[in-house]
Amino acid sequence: MGHGGGGALSAELVEHIFAPAFGGETLAQLGDSAAVTLAGARLAFSTDSYVVRPLFFPGGSIGDLAVNGTVNDLAMRGARAAYLSCGFILEEGVEMSVVARVAEALGAAARAAGVEVATGDTKVVESGHGDGVFLNTAGIGLIPPGVDLRPQRVVPGDVVVVSGDIGVHGVAIMSVREGLEFGVEIESDCAALGELVDAMLAVTPDLHVLRDPTRGGLAAALNEIATASGTGIVIQERAVPVPPGVANACAILGLDPMYVANEGKLVAFVPREHADAVLGAMRSHRLGANAAVIGEVVADHPTMVVARTGLGGTRVVDLPIGEQLPRIC
């Protein structure tokens, strides 16, 4: 299970098996989506599969995740999603009413994100060989002129901004899966981030990199960017926005919110001279109302992420080995 968690085991799987088998310069980018050129147009292209359990949870469903996850992967390249494909893998015996609910949620999420589901596929596997409904979506979108979002552009002095409260999706899934109560209902932050990214790019197209911290949480995203850019990252632990419900749940269960998955947040690396304007644009959008500067890029300790604690000490924020909460997307 750890190999699917977005941490060190996932990275080893890609590095030692998939990348050598597939090859190619485009794949070597290893971003949330690939940037390709076709007939003179710059396109972002992404695919993702969804195996979340349960299928429906506070704040969303597997159908919402399938749309928003792929839309967000394209947005992290600066592209607004134009078309999606959708593949349904159904387990024999799943109720048609459940399939209908998932399909309706997926269609509603696509319309809300302004993207068209243009093609699809359906497969059915024998009872006991699936888990009700699995989904796969792929998407394409145009990358605007002058936009070049990739971790290799990150340089010392860049400001690290997160778009809002972290850890909400993972805790929402865990609460319904395990029947836990934390004194307040926590809803997933599942959302399409295309409009938020548009607002940021309207301030300046010179953002360096965007990443949506899903599996492995914010810690995994920061470590991936530090490694790819060869820089160090310092974050202020107290500046990271963690809502009380998530903080309490993680304290009870011994989890670190930095490693808990998100489905409607992004982390941005912004040149310092544009940081205030970008932060203002983010806060003016409902999906970035709680945006916060959490740290900066440094030349020291390259490829490492370090957190300065509220007590004045420091700790290394490692890439997670696997996933604290499996099957969350």
Image: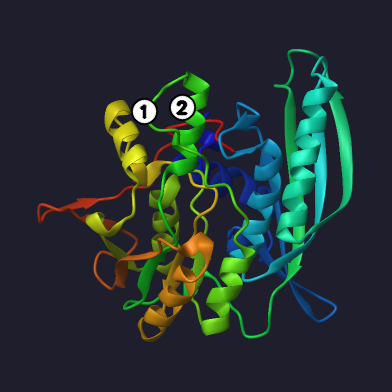
Q: Quadrant of residue 291?
A: bottom left
Viewer-proximal residue, 159 or 188?
188
Q: Is residue 120 left or right of residue 34?
A: right
> Are the two marked residues, 1 and 2, in contact with CB atoms closer than 8 angstroms?
yes
Amino acid type at circle 1 is Phe
Numbered badge on residue 92: none
Element under disc 2: helix
Residue 50 in view of the camera: yes
Q: Position of residue 176 (x, y in %)?
A: 51, 25
Q: Is residue 63 left or right of residue 155?
A: right
Q: Quadrant of residue 13?
A: top right
Q: Position of residue 138 (x, y in %)?
A: 76, 52
Q: Residue at x 17, y 53 (%)?
A: 309
Q: Is residue 104 above or below residue 288?
A: above
Q: Is residue 74 above or below residue 280?
A: above
Viewer-proximal residue, 274 or 165?
165
Residue 20 in view of the camera: no
Front position among marks 1 and 2: 1
Cα distance between the residues tagged 1 and 2: 8 Å
Q: Position of residue 294 (x, y in %)?
A: 31, 63
Numbered badge on residue 182: 1
Residue position marked by numbered label 2 in the rendering: 175
Q: In which quadrant will I find the C terminus?
A: top right
Q: Residue at x 51, y 66 (%)?
A: 210
Amino acid type at circle 2 is Ser
